[in-house]
Image (spheres, coloured by chain):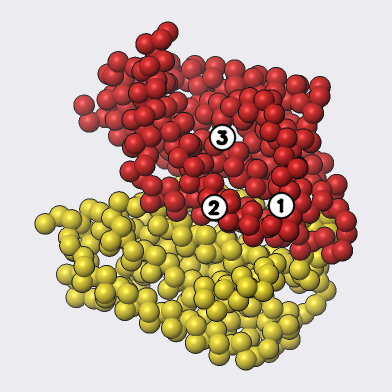
Amino acid sequence: MISELRKLRALIAICFEESIAYRASAFIWLLTDTVQVLLMPLVWLSAYNGREALGGFLPSQIVMYYLLMAMVSSFVTSHLMWDIAQDIKEGMLSQWLLRPVSVVSLFCARNLAWRLMRTGLLIPVLGLCAWYYRAHFNLGDLHLSGWFWLSVLLGHLVSFAIGLALSNIAFWVQEVQSVFGLYYFPMLLFSGWVAPLSLMPGWAQIIADFLPFRYSIAVPVEIGLGQLTGDLMLRSILMQVFWLGLGSLLAYALWKRGLRIYSGVGM
Amino acid sequence: MYRAFLRSSFVREAEFRANFWAKVIVNLGWASFFVITLKVVFGHTESIAGWSEGEAFVLAATCYLLDAVIGTLFWFGLTELPTMVRQGTLDFVLFKPIDSQFWLSMRRVNLDQLGSLFGGFALMGYALYQLDTIPSGLNVLLYFAMTFWGIVIYYSFHFMMMTLSIWFVRVDNLWVLSDVFVQIGRFPTDVFDRILRRVFTYVLPVAFLATIPAKALLGKSDIGFLSFAALWAITFFVVGRFFWRFALRSYTSASS
């Protein structure tokens, strides 16, 4: 167990160095997150038209929502299926399979390292955004309890498990990019990335309830803002565990089947 | 010359017909994403920074038209530039007896973006129906002139971003910079405070992509902006061209 943990730590360190080598492209990806946190609050703030609250949100709550959401989603949201799919297609996977660590922990480390670096890069940018929104910046809106951190961690794992399950499609489908492209559509829409789910139309909230995406982003954010408390919070965290289990199971089953037909191109 | 490019693009699409329709549908889906975002906000209010729902849809439609034109004509050819730099295949282009910028920009005509074009026109129709107005002939003319300059600005910006790949060989997502540029342009620049609004009009001319053309169609812009837009667009184009020439001087072929 201890040696496994030490291996994992070494892996994370290696992957972290690797991801720093790509900091220029990471910085560019960062801009897309920034546009969302900078623009959406501005759009909402321009929509108040003298009202005190909009759908129950005070101006400061809207601003804090997007700031926290950017932070959480940058740590949580996994994009690793692009890399894994490429490894599968180009036969690079063989190289990982031959190493003395399990492939899943390798992928997990790679994903975690990337997410940590992206979040680290985002902090100064969010600082700038917070300064821009200083009139509406209110630390009192944040409730960063232990439940929040637990929920963030679970959100990270839920998204990782789904990403892992999705990557397996590359075993069977050649043009996997368009499938991944399709994935982002419901993911961004029903995860709370576009807007707080409670501001979405009723039908969208119902759909969101049945999809895993809100359990990766919206739930931790709502807990962190003190909007999700008590029994409802505990139930949401349980649902995160449920989706983590289901995602992992799916990823495992597909992986087993996929490896059977994996030919290791280029070997 | 351009006819040959067009023909080869047609042939390529015809070979993968199922994939082609899938891409058309995906493009339309993404186009609707922003409309949904707007719908969410307008579910709680009647106007954003003075823009009613219909007016915001005119703006969104303008963005789709812009995206569709750029996506059909230039995007995919230009976006391959960083790959060509990395693999050294840019050499073959530079040896060709044809202007390299023209070749890179025009080579690939991407027809699956046509879905966005129809989507853009449909949204525009819906927006005008919702606003219950028929723009005057002069405003329509002004709109298309403004949009034309918007396309030139977008094209030149994307070309400059792709040119950066000559130096940043390992950065594989430079196209995201252009994407961010347009993402900002989707929202009316009126949502910004005075300083950022000036920045996005006079420094980084995002406002000319869609906000100002949309205002022209709605009869809220004065004709003086047209010459200003033209000035900006031509400047951007010329700077882009010089930048490319300048970049090529520091290009050291990867293959040799």
Q: Which of marks 2 and 3 is in front?
A: 2
Q: Which of A13 and B182 is in front in this view?
A: A13
User: Can you tell which chain is drawn yellow?
Assistant: B
Q: In which quarter of the image is residue B158?
A: bottom left
Q: CA separation, marks 2 and 3? A: 18 Å
Residue found at x 86% / y 53%:
A53
Q: Residues within 10 Å of mark 2 (few under 14, many from 20)?
A: some
B41 left or right of B158? right
Instruction: Report x, y in % for residue B190.
Output: 70, 71
Q: N-terminal of the two: label 1 or label 3?
A: 3
Rendering coords of residue A32 (x, y %): 53, 53
To which chain does the residue with label 3 belong? Answer: A
How far across and down, in percent of the image, does residue B106 sit?
A: 36, 70
Callout in the foreground (1, 3): 1
Residue position for label 3: A76
Disc 1 and disc 3: Cα gap in Å? 23 Å
Q: Residue beneath label 1, please?
A: A137
The crowding category of the residue bearing disc 3, from other C-alpha atoms within 10 Å (few below 14, some 14 to 19, many at least 20), is many
Asked whether, in this view, residue B214 is left or right of residue B9, the answer is right
As measured in the structure, the alpha-carbon distance from the residue carrying label 1 to the one carrying label 2 is 15 Å
Where disc 1 sits, the SS reads: loop
| Residue ID for mark 2 | A125
